Image: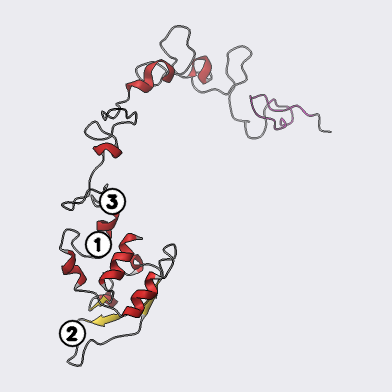
């Protein structure tokens, strides 16, 4: 059975180094100068409990000060602004309200009440922005860019949302022939985010997806 002395500091059960009262991990840590204390130094050669941190201004309290020179127990927590909605105790964000009660930013798109996530847009409209479309534009203007077969649509609908697999999505030339649209080899990718609309390869092309498929992608 190993009977070698363990590290001096509280909570450490590692063996001491030879000719030392500290383990390898704590070999460069200082000890609090308060008599009988086994804590590490925080500042001014004292641990947080014995003066290394500024203590609560309330007489007899040894907890660390947080806001307004008092600890959380004696009022620091109550100094944070709370949501002004009746009965809500959550921290206020904007307009003295929490996110749930109107304190968060709303999507830039007119009429959209969804919370903004990135760039001032919600997740749904942010994707349209990512794909080079105006999120505020009429959806009908966007749907005009896409079309597909009913078989492809049904195949996509049956796919697991967790996989969001989009297969057999074709790319067409912008200048269709008199006989109809010229289809190239199908693309297979895991999510429409993977398609780079700025790439040189797609400068002349647009993805072939119908309105139902596009709505399904936006809902994922």
Real-space CA distance between mark 2 and mark 3, rounded to the nearest whole angstrom: 35 Å
Q: Main secondary structure of the magenta part?
A: loop
As drawn, the label of residue 128 is 1
Residue 213 in the figure: left or right of residue 63: left
Residue extending furthest toward the right: 1
- Range of magenta residues: 4-21
Question: If you read the primary sequence from the N terminus, does the residue marked by circle 2 or circle 3 appear first?
Answer: 3
Q: Residue at x 19, y 50 (%)?
A: 108
Quarter of the view holding residue 216: bottom left
In the drawing, does residue 47 fall left or right of residue 154? right
Q: Please tell me whether residue 159 is drawn above or below residue 68 in the rendered image.
A: below
Q: Is residue 33 above or below residue 167?
A: above
Residue with the most extreme bottom position: 179
Mark 1 / mark 2, whichever is N-terminal: 1
User: Badge 3 is on which residue?
Assistant: 118
Gap between marks 3 and 1, in whole Å?
Answer: 12 Å
**Residue labelled with disc 2:** 175
Q: Are marks 3 and 1 in contact (CB under 8 Å)?
A: no
Considering only vertical position in the picture, is 213 above or below 88?
below
The residue nearer to you, when weighing 108 against 140, is 140
């Amino acid at each position: 059975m190993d009977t070698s002395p363990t590290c001096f500091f509280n909570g450490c059960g590692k063996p001491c180094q030879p000719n030392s009262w500290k383990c390898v991990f704590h070999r460069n840590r200082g000890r609090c100068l308060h008599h009988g204390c086994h804590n590490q130094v925080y500042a001014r050669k004292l641990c947080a409990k014995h003066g290394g941190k500024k203590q609560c201004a309330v007489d007899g309290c040894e907890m660390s000060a947080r806001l307004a020179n008092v600890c959380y127990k004696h009022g620091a927590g109550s100094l944070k602004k709370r949501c002004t909605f009746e009965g809500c105790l959550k921290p206020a964000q904007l307009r003295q309200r929490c996110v749930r009660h109107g304190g968060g930013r709303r999507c830039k798109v007119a009429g959209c009440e969804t919370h903004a996530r990135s760039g001032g847009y919600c997740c749904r409209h942010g994707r349209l922005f990512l794909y080079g479309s105006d999120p505020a534009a009429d959806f009908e203007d966007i749907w005009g860019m896409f079309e597909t077969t009913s078989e492809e649509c049904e195949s996509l609908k049956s796919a697991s949302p967790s996989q969001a697999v989009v297969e057999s999505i074709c790319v067409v030339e912008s200048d269709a022939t008199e006989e109809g649209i010229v289809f190239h080899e199908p693309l297979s990718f895991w999510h429409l985010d993977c398609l780079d609309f700025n790439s040189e390869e797609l400068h002349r092309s647009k993805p072939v997806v119908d309105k139902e498929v596009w709505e399904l992608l936006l809902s994922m």
